Amino acid sequence: MIAGTLGRYFAGRFFKTIALVFFGVFALIYALDLVETLRRSGDTPQAGGLLLAWLALLHTPIVAEQALPFVVLFGAMISFLNLSRKLELVVARSAGVSAWQFIAPPLAVVVAVAVVAVTLGNPAATAMKRQSDRIEAKLFGAGAAESGGVWIRQKSVDGEAVIHADGRDDAGPSLFHVQVYSFDAKGQFVERVDAAKATLRDGYWRLDDADVVTPGFDTLPTGAYLLATTLTRAEVAQAFAPPETVSFWSLSALADQTERAGLNAVGYRLQYQELLATPLMLAAMVLVAACFSLRFFRMGGVQRMVSGGVAAGFVLYVATKLVNDLGAAGLFSAPVAGWSPAVVGCAAGVYVLLHQEDG
Protein backbone atom coordinates (compact mmCIF):
# COMPACT_ATOMS: atom_id res chain seq x y z
CA MET A 1 0.00 0.00 0.00
CA ILE A 2 2.85 2.39 0.79
CA ALA A 3 4.50 1.70 -2.57
CA GLY A 4 1.18 2.16 -4.40
CA THR A 5 0.39 5.43 -2.64
CA LEU A 6 3.88 6.79 -3.27
CA GLY A 7 3.70 5.68 -6.89
CA ARG A 8 0.47 7.58 -7.50
CA TYR A 9 1.87 10.61 -5.70
CA PHE A 10 5.09 10.63 -7.74
CA ALA A 11 3.15 10.06 -10.97
CA GLY A 12 0.81 12.98 -10.21
CA ARG A 13 3.66 15.32 -9.33
CA PHE A 14 5.59 14.31 -12.42
CA PHE A 15 2.61 14.73 -14.77
CA LYS A 16 1.81 18.19 -13.42
CA THR A 17 5.42 19.29 -13.85
CA ILE A 18 5.80 18.13 -17.45
CA ALA A 19 2.36 19.62 -18.26
CA LEU A 20 3.47 23.03 -16.94
CA VAL A 21 6.76 22.81 -18.86
CA PHE A 22 4.91 21.80 -22.03
CA PHE A 23 2.45 24.71 -21.84
CA GLY A 24 5.35 27.08 -21.16
CA VAL A 25 7.25 25.80 -24.21
CA PHE A 26 4.04 25.88 -26.27
CA ALA A 27 3.44 29.53 -25.34
CA LEU A 28 7.06 30.43 -26.15
CA ILE A 29 6.90 28.73 -29.56
CA TYR A 30 3.60 30.46 -30.30
CA ALA A 31 4.97 33.89 -29.38
CA LEU A 32 8.07 33.44 -31.53
CA ASP A 33 6.05 32.12 -34.46
CA LEU A 34 3.57 34.98 -34.16
CA VAL A 35 6.39 37.52 -34.37
CA GLU A 36 7.82 35.75 -37.43
CA THR A 37 4.37 35.57 -39.06
CA LEU A 38 3.79 39.29 -38.46
CA ARG A 39 7.18 40.02 -40.01
CA ARG A 40 6.41 37.93 -43.07
CA SER A 41 3.00 39.49 -43.57
CA GLY A 42 4.52 42.93 -44.25
CA ASP A 43 2.00 44.99 -46.18
CA THR A 44 -0.20 42.08 -47.26
CA PRO A 45 -3.68 43.68 -47.23
CA GLN A 46 -5.69 40.52 -46.46
CA ALA A 47 -3.42 39.52 -43.53
CA GLY A 48 -5.41 40.71 -40.52
CA GLY A 49 -4.31 40.40 -36.93
CA LEU A 50 -6.75 37.62 -36.04
CA LEU A 51 -5.86 35.62 -39.15
CA LEU A 52 -2.13 35.88 -38.41
CA ALA A 53 -2.71 34.87 -34.78
CA TRP A 54 -4.69 31.85 -35.99
CA LEU A 55 -1.95 31.01 -38.52
CA ALA A 56 0.71 31.08 -35.79
CA LEU A 57 -1.46 28.81 -33.64
CA LEU A 58 -1.72 26.33 -36.53
CA HIS A 59 2.09 26.27 -36.79
CA THR A 60 2.73 25.68 -33.10
CA PRO A 61 1.60 22.04 -32.46
CA ILE A 62 3.92 20.48 -35.05
CA VAL A 63 6.92 22.35 -33.57
CA ALA A 64 5.85 21.54 -30.00
CA GLU A 65 5.68 17.87 -30.97
CA GLN A 66 9.33 17.97 -32.00
CA ALA A 67 10.22 19.64 -28.68
CA LEU A 68 8.42 16.97 -26.60
CA PRO A 69 11.58 14.99 -25.69
CA PHE A 70 13.20 18.12 -24.25
CA VAL A 71 9.97 18.96 -22.43
CA VAL A 72 10.09 15.53 -20.76
CA LEU A 73 13.80 15.92 -19.97
CA PHE A 74 13.41 19.32 -18.28
CA GLY A 75 10.15 18.33 -16.62
CA ALA A 76 11.70 15.17 -15.18
CA MET A 77 14.74 17.04 -13.87
CA ILE A 78 12.57 19.71 -12.25
CA SER A 79 10.30 17.08 -10.71
CA PHE A 80 13.16 15.00 -9.29
CA LEU A 81 15.00 18.07 -7.98
CA ASN A 82 11.84 19.35 -6.25
CA LEU A 83 11.28 15.98 -4.61
CA SER A 84 14.90 15.98 -3.43
CA ARG A 85 14.75 19.61 -2.24
CA LYS A 86 11.72 18.85 -0.05
CA LEU A 87 13.43 15.69 1.25
CA GLU A 88 10.64 13.51 -0.10
CA LEU A 89 13.13 11.26 -1.84
CA VAL A 90 15.05 10.96 1.40
CA VAL A 91 11.92 9.85 3.23
CA ALA A 92 11.07 7.39 0.44
CA ARG A 93 14.54 5.88 0.56
CA SER A 94 14.39 5.58 4.35
CA ALA A 95 11.08 3.71 3.99
CA GLY A 96 12.81 1.13 1.80
CA VAL A 97 11.69 2.46 -1.59
CA SER A 98 14.46 2.05 -4.15
CA ALA A 99 15.29 4.47 -6.94
CA TRP A 100 13.76 2.09 -9.45
CA GLN A 101 10.44 2.16 -7.61
CA PHE A 102 10.06 5.93 -7.74
CA ILE A 103 11.35 6.09 -11.33
CA ALA A 104 8.74 3.56 -12.49
CA PRO A 105 5.70 5.91 -12.11
CA PRO A 106 7.27 8.68 -14.25
CA LEU A 107 8.17 6.07 -16.87
CA ALA A 108 4.56 4.89 -16.95
CA VAL A 109 3.37 8.50 -17.28
CA VAL A 110 5.66 9.32 -20.22
CA VAL A 111 4.71 6.11 -22.04
CA ALA A 112 1.03 7.05 -21.70
CA VAL A 113 1.78 10.63 -22.79
CA ALA A 114 3.72 9.34 -25.81
CA VAL A 115 0.88 7.04 -26.89
CA VAL A 116 -1.62 9.91 -26.71
CA ALA A 117 0.78 12.29 -28.48
CA VAL A 118 1.38 9.86 -31.34
CA THR A 119 -2.14 8.50 -31.83
CA LEU A 120 -4.13 11.69 -31.20
CA GLY A 121 -1.75 14.65 -31.06
CA ASN A 122 0.19 13.88 -34.23
CA PRO A 123 -2.88 13.59 -36.51
CA ALA A 124 -4.22 16.87 -35.13
CA ALA A 125 -0.85 18.63 -35.49
CA THR A 126 -0.34 17.45 -39.08
CA ALA A 127 -3.87 18.48 -40.04
CA MET A 128 -3.25 21.96 -38.61
CA LYS A 129 0.08 22.15 -40.47
CA ARG A 130 -1.59 21.33 -43.78
CA GLN A 131 -4.25 23.95 -43.14
CA SER A 132 -1.58 26.54 -42.34
CA ASP A 133 0.21 25.69 -45.61
CA ARG A 134 -3.00 26.35 -47.56
CA ILE A 135 -3.52 29.67 -45.81
CA GLU A 136 0.09 30.69 -46.44
CA ALA A 137 -0.20 29.78 -50.11
CA LYS A 138 -3.13 32.18 -50.45
CA LEU A 139 -1.58 34.97 -48.37
CA PHE A 140 2.09 34.90 -49.32
CA GLY A 141 2.22 32.67 -52.37
CA ALA A 142 4.24 30.12 -50.38
CA GLY A 143 4.91 26.87 -52.17
CA ALA A 144 7.37 24.20 -52.88
CA ALA A 145 9.74 26.67 -54.55
CA GLU A 146 10.73 28.03 -51.15
CA SER A 147 12.00 24.61 -50.07
CA GLY A 148 13.98 23.88 -53.22
CA GLY A 149 11.17 22.25 -55.19
CA VAL A 150 10.43 18.55 -55.44
CA TRP A 151 11.97 15.55 -57.17
CA ILE A 152 9.83 12.77 -58.68
CA ARG A 153 11.10 9.50 -60.13
CA GLN A 154 8.77 7.61 -62.44
CA LYS A 155 8.77 4.44 -64.53
CA SER A 156 6.97 4.01 -67.84
CA VAL A 157 7.08 2.03 -71.06
CA ASP A 158 9.84 4.35 -72.30
CA GLY A 159 12.11 3.73 -69.29
CA GLU A 160 12.71 5.89 -66.23
CA ALA A 161 12.57 9.64 -65.83
CA VAL A 162 13.51 11.99 -63.01
CA ILE A 163 11.38 15.13 -62.80
CA HIS A 164 12.24 18.27 -60.88
CA ALA A 165 9.66 21.02 -60.40
CA ASP A 166 9.81 24.30 -58.50
CA GLY A 167 6.12 24.30 -57.64
CA ARG A 168 2.67 23.04 -58.51
CA ASP A 169 -0.80 24.40 -59.10
CA ASP A 170 -3.07 23.53 -56.17
CA ALA A 171 -6.13 23.95 -58.41
CA GLY A 172 -4.94 21.37 -60.97
CA PRO A 173 -2.35 18.69 -61.79
CA SER A 174 0.25 21.10 -63.18
CA LEU A 175 3.92 21.61 -62.32
CA PHE A 176 5.89 24.78 -62.99
CA HIS A 177 9.54 25.32 -64.02
CA VAL A 178 10.10 21.65 -64.84
CA GLN A 179 13.23 19.71 -65.73
CA VAL A 180 12.97 16.11 -66.94
CA TYR A 181 15.95 13.73 -67.15
CA SER A 182 15.02 10.70 -69.29
CA PHE A 183 16.74 7.29 -69.26
CA ASP A 184 16.12 4.25 -71.45
CA ALA A 185 15.27 0.75 -70.27
CA LYS A 186 19.00 0.01 -69.73
CA GLY A 187 19.50 3.07 -67.53
CA GLN A 188 21.38 5.08 -70.16
CA PHE A 189 20.78 8.83 -70.22
CA VAL A 190 18.69 9.85 -73.26
CA GLU A 191 17.77 13.53 -73.02
CA ARG A 192 16.87 16.45 -70.81
CA VAL A 193 13.69 18.47 -71.24
CA ASP A 194 13.24 21.95 -69.77
CA ALA A 195 9.67 23.24 -69.74
CA ALA A 196 7.78 26.14 -68.25
CA LYS A 197 4.83 23.94 -67.35
CA ALA A 198 3.96 20.25 -67.17
CA THR A 199 0.35 19.04 -66.98
CA LEU A 200 -0.54 15.48 -65.97
CA ARG A 201 -3.02 13.78 -68.27
CA ASP A 202 -4.23 10.18 -68.37
CA GLY A 203 -1.07 8.20 -69.04
CA TYR A 204 1.26 11.04 -70.01
CA TRP A 205 2.70 14.43 -69.14
CA ARG A 206 2.20 17.38 -71.49
CA LEU A 207 5.18 19.75 -71.27
CA ASP A 208 4.54 23.22 -72.70
CA ASP A 209 7.22 25.58 -74.08
CA ALA A 210 9.82 22.84 -73.83
CA ASP A 211 13.48 22.74 -74.85
CA VAL A 212 14.80 19.23 -75.60
CA VAL A 213 18.53 18.74 -74.99
CA THR A 214 19.95 15.53 -76.51
CA PRO A 215 23.66 14.64 -76.25
CA GLY A 216 25.39 15.29 -79.58
CA PHE A 217 22.56 17.41 -81.00
CA ASP A 218 21.47 21.03 -80.83
CA THR A 219 18.76 22.14 -78.42
CA LEU A 220 15.34 21.59 -79.99
CA PRO A 221 12.56 24.01 -78.96
CA THR A 222 9.04 22.60 -79.11
CA GLY A 223 5.66 23.94 -78.16
CA ALA A 224 4.50 20.67 -76.59
CA TYR A 225 6.33 17.53 -75.51
CA LEU A 226 4.57 14.33 -74.42
CA LEU A 227 6.14 12.06 -71.77
CA ALA A 228 4.60 8.69 -70.91
CA THR A 229 3.86 8.05 -67.23
CA THR A 230 2.03 5.68 -64.91
CA LEU A 231 1.60 8.23 -62.13
CA THR A 232 -1.77 9.42 -60.92
CA ARG A 233 -2.75 12.84 -59.60
CA ALA A 234 -2.86 11.55 -56.03
CA GLU A 235 0.65 10.13 -56.31
CA VAL A 236 2.01 13.39 -57.69
CA ALA A 237 0.35 15.31 -54.86
CA GLN A 238 2.03 12.98 -52.35
CA ALA A 239 5.44 14.01 -53.65
CA PHE A 240 4.73 17.51 -52.35
CA ALA A 241 3.69 16.27 -48.90
CA PRO A 242 6.66 16.30 -46.46
CA PRO A 243 6.66 13.31 -44.06
CA GLU A 244 6.15 15.59 -41.03
CA THR A 245 2.81 16.76 -42.49
CA VAL A 246 1.40 13.22 -42.83
CA SER A 247 -0.65 11.70 -40.03
CA PHE A 248 0.74 8.75 -38.11
CA TRP A 249 -2.21 6.61 -39.21
CA SER A 250 -1.53 7.33 -42.91
CA LEU A 251 2.26 7.01 -43.02
CA SER A 252 2.57 3.25 -43.52
CA ALA A 253 -0.06 3.03 -46.27
CA LEU A 254 1.32 6.14 -47.95
CA ALA A 255 4.84 4.69 -47.95
CA ASP A 256 3.60 1.48 -49.61
CA GLN A 257 1.65 3.43 -52.21
CA THR A 258 4.62 5.70 -52.89
CA GLU A 259 6.95 2.74 -53.44
CA ARG A 260 4.48 1.10 -55.84
CA ALA A 261 4.53 4.32 -57.86
CA GLY A 262 8.32 4.11 -58.11
CA LEU A 263 8.88 7.11 -55.82
CA ASN A 264 11.17 7.44 -52.81
CA ALA A 265 9.34 6.43 -49.62
CA VAL A 266 12.30 6.48 -47.21
CA GLY A 267 11.15 9.71 -45.55
CA TYR A 268 7.69 8.32 -44.78
CA ARG A 269 9.03 5.04 -43.39
CA LEU A 270 11.61 6.85 -41.26
CA GLN A 271 8.97 9.22 -39.87
CA TYR A 272 6.74 6.24 -39.06
CA GLN A 273 9.50 4.44 -37.16
CA GLU A 274 10.41 7.62 -35.26
CA LEU A 275 6.82 8.02 -34.11
CA LEU A 276 6.65 4.35 -33.09
CA ALA A 277 9.83 4.85 -31.03
CA THR A 278 8.46 7.95 -29.25
CA PRO A 279 7.50 6.11 -26.01
CA LEU A 280 10.99 4.63 -25.75
CA MET A 281 12.63 7.98 -26.53
CA LEU A 282 10.65 9.74 -23.78
CA ALA A 283 11.54 6.93 -21.38
CA ALA A 284 15.20 7.49 -22.30
CA MET A 285 14.83 11.16 -21.42
CA VAL A 286 13.41 10.25 -17.99
CA LEU A 287 16.31 7.88 -17.33
CA VAL A 288 18.83 10.52 -18.43
CA ALA A 289 17.17 13.06 -16.12
CA ALA A 290 17.24 10.56 -13.23
CA CYS A 291 20.99 10.03 -13.72
CA PHE A 292 21.61 13.72 -12.95
CA SER A 293 18.77 14.59 -10.56
CA LEU A 294 18.58 11.96 -7.82
CA ARG A 295 21.42 13.30 -5.74
CA PHE A 296 20.34 14.77 -2.38
CA PHE A 297 19.70 18.49 -2.79
CA ARG A 298 21.59 19.52 0.37
CA MET A 299 24.78 17.87 -0.84
CA GLY A 300 25.22 20.73 -3.32
CA GLY A 301 26.38 20.59 -6.90
CA VAL A 302 22.87 21.28 -8.25
CA GLN A 303 24.13 23.52 -11.06
CA ARG A 304 26.59 20.87 -12.18
CA MET A 305 23.86 18.23 -12.15
CA VAL A 306 21.49 20.37 -14.20
CA SER A 307 24.22 21.26 -16.68
CA GLY A 308 25.17 17.61 -17.03
CA GLY A 309 21.56 16.60 -17.66
CA VAL A 310 21.07 19.31 -20.29
CA ALA A 311 24.34 18.36 -21.99
CA ALA A 312 23.40 14.66 -22.02
CA GLY A 313 19.98 15.47 -23.49
CA PHE A 314 21.58 17.67 -26.14
CA VAL A 315 24.06 14.93 -27.08
CA LEU A 316 21.21 12.44 -27.40
CA TYR A 317 19.27 14.91 -29.57
CA VAL A 318 22.26 15.50 -31.88
CA ALA A 319 22.87 11.76 -32.14
CA THR A 320 19.20 11.24 -33.03
CA LYS A 321 19.35 13.83 -35.81
CA LEU A 322 22.62 12.39 -37.13
CA VAL A 323 21.27 8.84 -37.25
CA ASN A 324 18.05 10.07 -38.86
CA ASP A 325 20.01 11.90 -41.57
CA LEU A 326 22.02 8.75 -42.23
CA GLY A 327 18.79 6.80 -42.43
CA ALA A 328 17.30 9.32 -44.87
CA ALA A 329 20.44 8.96 -47.00
CA GLY A 330 19.90 5.20 -47.12
CA LEU A 331 22.93 4.22 -45.02
CA PHE A 332 20.70 2.76 -42.28
CA SER A 333 17.35 1.05 -42.57
CA ALA A 334 14.33 2.99 -41.33
CA PRO A 335 13.79 0.78 -38.20
CA VAL A 336 17.46 1.05 -37.21
CA ALA A 337 17.52 4.83 -37.73
CA GLY A 338 14.23 5.32 -35.92
CA TRP A 339 14.81 3.09 -32.90
CA SER A 340 18.56 3.02 -32.24
CA PRO A 341 18.87 6.46 -30.53
CA ALA A 342 16.07 5.60 -28.09
CA VAL A 343 17.48 2.12 -27.40
CA VAL A 344 20.99 3.48 -26.81
CA GLY A 345 19.63 6.28 -24.60
CA CYS A 346 17.67 3.84 -22.44
CA ALA A 347 20.59 1.44 -22.19
CA ALA A 348 22.98 4.24 -21.17
CA GLY A 349 20.52 5.56 -18.58
CA VAL A 350 19.96 2.12 -17.04
CA TYR A 351 23.70 1.47 -16.93
CA VAL A 352 24.46 4.74 -15.13
CA LEU A 353 21.61 4.24 -12.65
CA LEU A 354 22.74 0.69 -11.89
CA HIS A 355 26.22 2.00 -11.25
CA GLN A 356 24.95 4.83 -9.00
CA GLU A 357 22.34 2.90 -7.06
CA ASP A 358 23.63 -0.67 -6.92
CA GLY A 359 27.36 -0.17 -7.36
Image: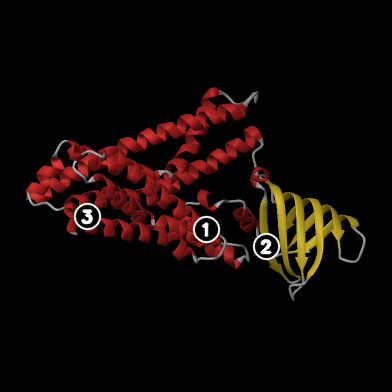
Q: Secondary structure at mark 1?
A: helix
How far is disc 3 from disc 1 in space, using C-alphas? 40 Å
Instruction: Between residue 337 and residue 153, name the one nearer to us.
Output: 337
Instruction: Between residue 59 and residue 82, name the one nearer to us.
Output: 82
Residue type (three-letter) at the residue carrying disc 2: Arg
Q: Residues within 10 Å of mark 3 (few under 14, many from 20)?
A: few
The answer to whether residue 325 is visible is: yes
Instruction: Find residue 182 and name its label.
Output: none
Q: Name the colouring of the figure.
A: secondary structure
Q: Of tags 3 and 1, which is closer to the observer? A: 3
Residue type (three-letter) at the residue carrying disc 3: Gln
Mark 2 vs 1, N-terminal side: 2
- Which residue lies under the disc numbered 1? 268
Mark 2 vs 3, N-terminal side: 2
Would you say 35 lies left or right of 22 here? right
Q: Of tags 2 and 3, which is closer to the observer? A: 3
- Which residue lies under the disc numbered 2? 153
Q: Secondary structure at mark 2?
A: strand
Residue 298, image x, y percentages = 18, 37
Q: Residues within 10 Å of mark 2 (few under 14, many from 20)?
A: some
Instruction: Between residue 330 and residue 184, name the one nearer to us.
Output: 330
Relative vertical location of residue 64 with respect to residue 173 in this rendering, above or below? above
Res. 161 image quadrant: bottom right
Q: Residue shown at 27%/56% (left/top)?
A: 352
